[in-house]
Amino acid sequence: KKSVLSLLTIINDILDVSKLENHKLEIIPTETNVYKLCRDIQLLFQSDVIEKNLKFNLDFTIDRYYSSSDENAILLT
């Protein structure tokens, strides 16, 4: 079941990238945990960072800072 959900997420991301390239992606602002978003981005690039012997540090004093944004659109760009 988890594999099916992962595949569905990948397919949806591909469709969203296509919409983004055609300037048809609808931005839906929602309350977003900025720390979690940055942590997700860090995890997304973790293998590249390790492979290139780089560092990617997050320095947050709080882990519950919220913003109104579209998390999926941010991750796509």
Image: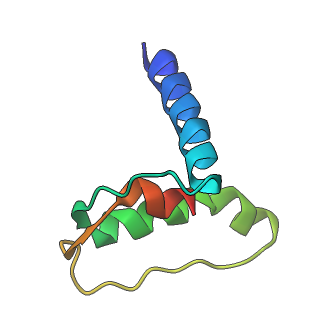
Q: Position of residue 62 (x, y in %)?
A: 21, 81
Please indicate whether residue 9 sits to the left or right of residue 71 in the image.
right
Q: Position of residue 40 (x, y in %)?
A: 45, 59
Above or below, 62 against 4 in this view is: below
Front in this rendered view, residue 11 or 25 = 25
Please indicate whether residue 65 sits to the left or right of residue 55 in the image.
left
Which part of the image, by quadrant, shows the N terminus?
A: top left
Q: How many marks?
A: 0
Q: Where is residue 57 in the image (x, y as percent from the top left)?
A: 52, 80
Above or below, 44 against 69 in this view is: above
Which part of the image, by quadrant, shows the C terminus?
A: bottom right
x 39%, y 86%: residue: 59
Please indicate whether residue 29 sits to the left or right of residue 2 in the image.
left
Query: In the rendered view, how is the structure colored?
Result: rainbow
Extreme residue toward the top, this view: 1
x 40%, y 52%: residue: 26
x 26%, y 61%: residue: 29
Front in this rendered view, residue 3 or 59 = 3
x 36%, y 58%: residue: 27
Please tell me in which quadrant of the rendered image residue 56 appears. Answer: bottom right
Q: Where is residue 50 in the image (x, y as percent from the top left)?
A: 72, 65
